[in-house]
Amino acid sequence: MEKEVMSSLKMAGNILCSASSFIRKCIFGVLRVGPIPNHIAFIMDGNRRYAKKQKLSHDGAAGGGGRYDAGFWALMVMLLYCQELGVKYITAYAFSIDNFKRKPEEVESLMASMLEKFHLLDILVKRLAVRVHFAGNLELLSNELRASAMELTEATAAYSKSVLTICIAYTSRDEILHAVRESCEQKRIDLEFDNDDDNEIKLMKVEKNMYMAVAPDPDIIIRTGGENRLSNFLLWQSSRSHLHSMWVLWPEIGVWNLVFAILNFQRNKTYHLEMKKKEKEL
């Protein structure tokens, strides 16, 4: 009797899953009639509030990784949805330089969780043919975590179906400072060896040295958790981006949240095109 009940529940689950998949494909088909963003960036806010809501530990105590697990799988789900829709570039704000100011045990727990997730991410992205890129001051990470990030970057370098950029040990101010320093150093070397007689540093050179040079400027920046600020994220790249804030906490984000964000973007697409045209004319 128990086996029959379990079998019936499994069958019902499969039917519901198939129905959900069919509905999603229909909705995505309607969305694709309009313009689909090429690049969506996520500010993954609300993990700590989710932990409090679910009574998960905030530090390195047992069970403390639950909120990180939920946040990781939320990102994987968004990656799958974006790939299904045809969004090529996905960027996630995973860890700010400012987050190093949190309690040491919390930072340590998060770093340990990241290392674990990198190994799992390696398996998943290879199946999806996703190239992984890390943006940020990786020198601030532990040797083990930095090496794991570099290995994952190299292992997926040949993939081109989608590009997932994970911003870790990142702030936009640090990115701009890094780009300016690198540009000045390159200009100094060129002048020293007579490779260039122009003292001016071109804007193109600065942008080439940005951590985010691997991806175009985001079409949409989605922030969960109900806040309406960028929090030092992609300040250089977001002048023409559509900003979309939602109250849902990051681990709880779902397909409908993504759908509404893209519909909102499509509704305002004309305005963004006009802004791009005016900028080119300047």
Image (cartoon, rainbow, N blue to C red):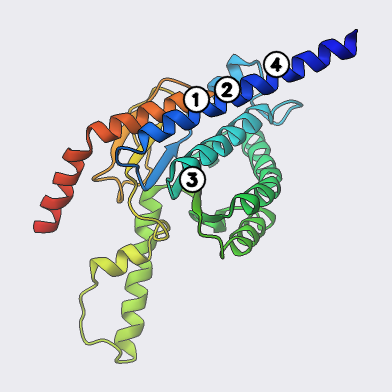
**Screen quadrant of the N terminus:** top right
Label 3 is placed on what type of residue? Ile
Between discs 4 and 1, the one toward the N terminus: 4
- Amino acid type for the residue under numbered disc 1: Ile
Between 180 and 207, the one nearer to me in the picture:
207
Which of discs 3 and 2 lies nearer the camera? The answer is: 2
Sequence-wise, the earlier of marks 3 and 4 is 4
Above or below, comparing residue 220 to residue 205 in the picture: above
Could you tell me if the residues under marks 2 and 1 are in contact, i.e. CB atoms within 8 Å?
yes
Q: Which residue is mark 4?
A: 12
For label 2, the crowd category at 10 Å Cα-Cα, with few meaning under 14, some 14 to 19 and many 20 or more, is: few
Q: Residue 40 or 94: which is nearer the viewer?
A: 40
Residue 226, by quadrant, is: top left
User: For numbered disc 4, what is the local secondary structure?
Assistant: helix
Crowding around mark 4 (Cα neighbors within 10 Å: few <14, some 14 to 19, many 20+) is few
Q: Which is more foreground, mark 3 or mark 4?
A: 4
Picture coordinates of residue 136 (x, y %)?
48, 54
Q: Which mark is residue 19?
A: 2
Name the residue located 49 percent from the left edge and 44 percent from the top edge.
83
Q: Report the quarter where the C terminus lies.
A: bottom left
Mark 4 or mark 2: name the one nearer the start of the chain: 4
> Looking at numbered disc 4 in the image, what kind of residue is underneath it?
Ala
Q: What residue type is disc 2 on?
A: Ala
Is label 4 in contact with label 1 (beta carbons under 8 Å)? no
Q: Does the rendering let one see residue 156?
A: yes
Q: Secondary structure at mark 3?
A: helix
Estimate the x, y position of residue 145 in percent, counting from the top left: 66, 53
Residue 97 badge:
3
CA distance for labels 3 and 4: 46 Å
Q: Are marks 4 and 2 in contact (CB under 8 Å)?
A: no
Mark seen at residue 23 = 1
